[in-house]
Image: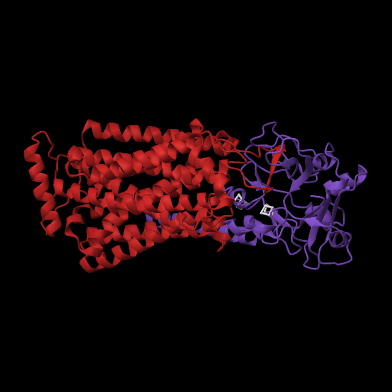
Chain colours: A purple, B red
Amino acid sequence: MDRREFLKTGGLFLVGTPCVYGLMAMAAPRPHEAGATDARRWGMVIDLNRCPADCSACLEACRRENNVAVHGDRRWDIHWIRKVTIRKKHEADAPTRTLPLLCNHCDHPPCAQVCPVQATYKRADGIVIVDHHRCIGCRYCLIACPYNARYFNYRENDEWPNKAYPKRSHGVAESCNFCAHRLDQGRPPACVEACRDSGAGALKVGDLDDPDSEISRLIADNSVKRIREDLGTEPKVYYIGL
Amino acid sequence: MEIDYEPIAGRSTGYYLLLTALLVLVAAGVTATVLMIAYGIHLSGMTNRVPWGLQIVMAIFYIGLSAGSLVVSGLYGIFGKLEYKPFARIAAFLAMLFLIAGLLSIVTDQGRIDRVFVQPFAHFNATSMFSINPALYMGHIMICIFYMWALFKEKGRLTKVTSVTVVLWALCVHTGTGAIFAFTPRELYNTALLPPSFVAAALSSGAALMILVLVSLFRITRRHLDVALVIWLGRLLAVFIIVAMYVILIENAHRFYLIESREATSYYLFKGYHAVLFWGGLIVVGSVVPAVLLFRRRTGTSVPWIVFSSVLVVVGVLCERYLIVLPGLEHPPNLFPGMEIIASALDEGIVTYSISLLEILQALGVLSLIGFMFVLGLKYLPLLPTEARAHGQSQMLKDLIARATANAEAEPTSPAV
Ligand code: SF4
Ligand code: SF4
């Protein structure tokens, strides 16, 4: 190979490789996209009157189902769903309330708005999801989510209980995805199923656009609240008894 | 006015020692980054509650420095101020290097560095400031290179046009960088004054940097630099400081006044280490003291005092950059207005970010890399003029020269540069 040829091949290689990668990246299909249709708009209702403060069935089911990382360190542990106890400010003897918090699958999700690679996006059925094969790990979505519902894989997850669902490499962001893979198969999310099996039945998932769905009726018949509705993010998780 | 440019010889032991030292630091930074790529960025001080840290602080600090030096360089082209001509090249070169430093800090901060060079281009998101900014940065670097070429070739008209473009582009770049924070729904971030205060602080840090680089370079290479020029740059710096301080004070007064953000604002203005950084670092050390020094007749015309003020300004702006990023993360979002969270598996209250050693090495590595390029540039590019003289263009400059001379006579110890 003479010099000219070498330079030519080298140049082609230098320019070509990123282009090929770029095209491959552009053509890569979205995960869990198959079941998404705009015929449905998934939402959740959480009835706090039926949610015992000391129950953690949903949290454990979620960890088992989605291989959510626990490192035993509060700085890096990931919680797709977590329970928090709240009470009125500056009133030590005010009654407390314990409630599950998860990604609200906002209709106007700031996390997706800021994602520089569209790794975070809203599916046709309203589920906000992260494409872990595309995320560059900039953590801008953690900054933009007003609910602390986003987490980052700061370190490798050693556990992999559910081999049917992938675990994530370190360096990518994640959050609750309403168990899109289960909803697409007609099964309820792991947390909803565990809550039902525990006998509490506080978590309900369903179609917000269908006025006859169980959750639409719950929303119509009860006084419901969403978290920080004032932000205009249009959360799709509704609380009864908050 | 003809100016001769002459690169430094760069054959002394000191020169090679400096290059070696910088390379060692670069290697340390590379090692730190490789470790993070291999094991994850929990090796930094960042957490799920504080997902941005030192690298982002340094990135916006560098990008600010870049803007400032560019504006100083552009002054020559825009206003035809011949006084600045000797600095135009070196300022443009520094602006380019600091922009590279900013980009490198951001790149090394990503969780999946392997994807940074492909995904953002394949899936550009027009609503993300993190997509828009890299495009602006890239353009900025290219305009800088073109501008330097125009300066090297002494293209009069072209230089003028480019320098206007460059300054306007720099303003966009810095507004965009401020918008990374301002355009998010976070209490201490989402103020429209953030981009302007970002630009204002950028200008003062850039002018301060120019003073430091020029005075030290001309002294080390034993070239003549007229005191009047340093005084003139000091004046410019003083004006920038006042503007920056004004915007920053208004910004904070506004969010302190509004009841909804008062709690968060008073947390960072009056409690903990942020208060020390804000009042001590930014306001007193970084703004008031240098402004007074620069405006006072005696200190404002003495090179050592101007240099000292510039150091203070750089420190102050670094504090300001830290305060843009961290308090807004360390202070939690208000999930339940009127309520407090008393138990959770996540840290829901105020948390503290602590910088890790590897992050410091990463930051030093980036700084050393552009230091290395700068030192090489001095040797291989015609950046440095053989001398920088103030040609009495304006009455103000003449006054300054007269005053500086009077000072030098009154105080025989005052150093000539
Ligand atoms: S709750 Fe947070 S992560 Fe979930 S959609 Fe809304 S902004 Fe995004
Ligand atoms: S961390 Fe990943 S998902 Fe989140 S904004 Fe960045 S690229 Fe998007």
The percent coordinates of residue B279 (x first, y second) are 41, 39
Q: Is residue A95 left or right of residue A75?
A: right
The percent coordinates of residue B354 (x first, y second) are 53, 33
Residue B258 visible in the picture:
yes
Position of residue A195 relative to residue A77, above or below, is: below
User: In front here: B289 or A41?
Assistant: B289
The percent coordinates of residue A100 (x first, y second) are 78, 45
Position of residue B287 relative to residue B15, above or below, is: below
Position of residue B352 relative to residue B328, above or below, is: above
Residue drawn at point x = 65 percent, y = 51 percent: A133
Count the marks: 0
Residue drawn at point x = 85 percent, y = 58 percent: A222
Residue drawn at point x = 32 percent, y = 39 percent: B312
Q: Is residue B375 left or right of residue B182?
A: left
Residue B187 visible in the picture:
no
The percent coordinates of residue B203 (x first, y second) are 34, 52
Q: Is residue A216 left or right of residue B271?
A: right
Q: Is residue A34 left or right of residue B140?
A: right
Position of residue B408 relative to residue B13, above or below, is: below
